[in-house]
Image: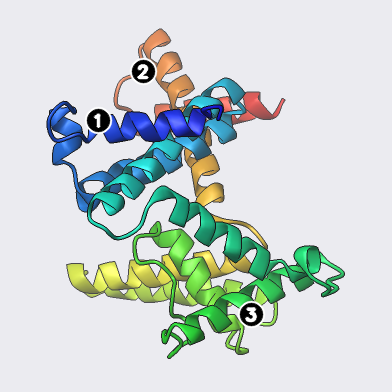
């Protein structure tokens, strides 16, 4: 039988974890120690996609696949499950959640498919005994903005939602006013943090109502700021502008204008 590249990768992972001849670093890892690397690799995949770098994407997908293989190998050593079990579980899930492809159910639109997908997920949570709330199953380890959008999307499934995006804007104004009021009263750090959290949660809701992923929007905004600020730095050095805020702001406005022209 021909050995596939996946077979080769699984064999490499087994060798790295071999108690006698493996790599000391790989042997001492456990699920918790590897988890941060798994998250990091997922972000590096997203970064390659954002940059449109397909060569990097190939490499980053490989790194992410290695993380899956690593976790599966540790689970196999513990007698829990193996890589084939992982692959079988996701294959079964995809067939189960796509009855319009692998069965005889008809779904006419993407919106209908999204609703059917969430219904399937809810049914699975209920079957596993974890359906006390529509909010169950949203991972705690998700980035905060992404988790906020997912939590509010779940709440909206039972009608707890604004009618449209414009209706969220007064909520943002309300949260800003509450933050300003707390700052006027001296700004207790714990209360300021709470009010800031409320403001960010409202912003995540507005993004959701606009069908915008807040994580993506914030990454793009940060990249834009970084690009413009680097140009401001260069101009400031060229024109010998020091820490004069008005002069730096003038440079910022110049960079913005040049970008738009």
Asked whether the viewer can see residue 186, the reply is no
Q: How is the image coloured?
A: rainbow
Disc 2 packing (10 Å; few <14; some 14–19; many ≥20): some
Closer to the camera: disc 3 or disc 2?
Answer: 3
Compared with 228, 205 (above or below) is below
Instruction: Residue under label 1, please give it.
Output: 16
Instruction: Residue under label 2, please give it.
Output: 241
Judge left or right: residue 138 versus residue 79: right
For the residue pair 27 and 116, the one nearer the viewer reads as: 27
Mark found first going from the N terminus, 3 or 2 = 3
Disc 1 packing (10 Å; few <14; some 14–19; many ≥20): some
Q: Secondary structure at mark 2?
A: loop
Closer to the camera: disc 1 or disc 2?
Answer: 1
As drawn, the label of residue 119 is 3
User: In which quadrant of the rendered image does the C terminus lie?
Assistant: top right
Q: Residue at x 18, y 28 (%)?
A: 22
For the residue pair 228 and 202, the one nearer the viewer reads as: 202
For the residue pair 196 and 129, the one nearer the viewer reads as: 129
As drawn, the label of residue 92 is none
Return the x and y of residue 199 as percentages of the image width and height: 43, 68
Q: Secondary structure at mark 1?
A: helix
Closer to the camera: disc 3 or disc 1?
Answer: 1
């Amino acid at each position: 039988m021909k050995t596939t590249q996946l077979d080769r990768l699984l064999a490499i992972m087994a060798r790295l974890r071999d108690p006698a001849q493996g790599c000391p670093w790989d042997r001492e890892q456990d699920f918790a120690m590897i988890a941060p690397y798994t998250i990091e690799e997922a972000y590096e995949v997203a970064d390659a996609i954002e940059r449109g770098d397909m060569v990097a994407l190939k490499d980053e997908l490989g790194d992410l696949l290695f993380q899956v293989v690593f976790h599966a190998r540790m689970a196999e050593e513990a007698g829990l499950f193996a890589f084939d079990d992982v692959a079988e579980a996701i294959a079964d899930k995809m067939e189960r959640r796509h009855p319009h492809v692998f069965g005889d159910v008809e779904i006419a639109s993407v919106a209908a498919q999204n609703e059917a997908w969430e219904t399937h997920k809810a049914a699975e949570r209920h079957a596993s005994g974890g359906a006390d709330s529509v909010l169950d199953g949203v991972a705690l380890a998700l980035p905060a903005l992404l988790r906020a959008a997912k939590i509010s999307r779940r709440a909206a499934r039972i009608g707890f939602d604004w009618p449209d995006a414009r209706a969220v804007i007064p909520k943002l104004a309300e949260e800003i006013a509450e933050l300003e009021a707390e700052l006027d009263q001296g700004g207790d750090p714990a209360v300021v943090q709470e009010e800031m959290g409320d403001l960010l949660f409202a912003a995540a809701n507005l993004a959701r109502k606009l069908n915008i992923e807040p994580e993506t929007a914030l990454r793009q905004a940060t990249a834009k700021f970084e690009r413009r600020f680097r140009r401001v730095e260069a101009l400031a050095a060229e024109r010998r502008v020091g820490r004069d805020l008005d002069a730096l702001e003038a440079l910022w406005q110049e960079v913005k204008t040049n970008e738009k022209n």
